[in-house]
Image (cartoon, rainbow, N blue to C red):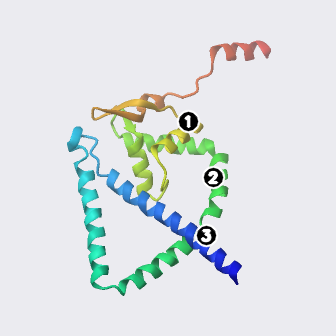
Amino acid sequence: MTRRLTTAANRLAAGSTVLGRRLAARAAAWVRRARRDDLTGWRAALGCWARLALLLLGLYLLWRLVRAFPNLLWLFTGAWLISAWRAAKTPPTEPPQACDEEASAGADVDALRTLLLDLMGKGAGVHLRTVLAHLQEHGQWEGRTVTDLRLRLQRLGVPHDPKVKVAGVPTWGVRRRNLETPSQTPDPETSTTSSTAA
């Protein structure tokens, strides 16, 4: 019986960690999406501060509600335990999906290029934080960072640069000219060597 309780407690602890990270990532993505790329300085981040203030206000009101009606804690605790229990079941399904992603790298590159070009619109480039926010808004890449996205682009051979300017702000991003021209052009020496060998 002790082993079963230990297994259940471990599952709830792991699920609570996953759930906490997931909620934090969603909140952070929601706040980041308020950043204006068409503005600079403190005006660009004003929307982020407003959303952060809304989050803090919501947490304060929730705390006041629980203080006024302590029995609500039972409801919140039950909902958290059920969600944590379910969240602990998801990690085993992730490695096969990762293997499938690596197997279909060619299709991923095409899909990623299309997504990047769509996010650019008529602009000359797109920031990686904008791409990440878009992915997280559509239920993908939760809990991941711009660094994770950079590593993914590097593995897929998609050129990216730390000084891409969008609305006058330079940061990590992808330029349109790097996507419209093939990233891997054949090396002249390699092509002459191969033709000589043939």
Which disc number belongs to residue 154? 1
Q: Within 10 Å of the Cα at label 1, are there few (<14), some (14-19), or many (20+) other Cα atoms?
A: few
Q: What percent of the width, then of the height, locates residue 51?
A: 27, 57
Q: Nearer the viewer, residue 86 or 77?
A: 77
Q: What percent of the width, then of the height, locates residue 108?
A: 57, 45
Q: Measure the alpha-carbon separation of dots 2 and 3.
A: 16 Å
Please identify, in this view, whether the residue under mark 1 or under mark 3 is nearer the observer.
Answer: 3
Question: Which residue is rendered at x = 47% and y = 32% of the image?
Answer: 160
Q: Measure the alpha-carbon separation of dots 1 and 3.
A: 30 Å
Mark 3: secondary structure: loop
Mark 2: secondary structure: helix
Whether the residues at callouts 1 and 3 have beta carbons within 8 Å, the answer is no
Q: Is residue 60 above or below residue 115?
A: below
Q: Residue furthest right?
A: 197
Question: Which residue is rendered at x = 25% and y = 53% of the image?
Answer: 49
Q: What percent of the width, then of the height, locates residue 154?
A: 55, 36
Mark 1: secondary structure: helix
Which disc number belongs to residue 89? 3
Q: Nearer the viewer, residue 138 or 66?
A: 66
Which residue in the structure is indicated by mark 2?
98
Question: Which residue is rendered at x = 47% and y = 60% of the image?
Answer: 21
Q: Is residue 144 above or below residue 73?
A: above
Question: Is residue 186 found left or right of 63 in the rendered image?
Answer: right
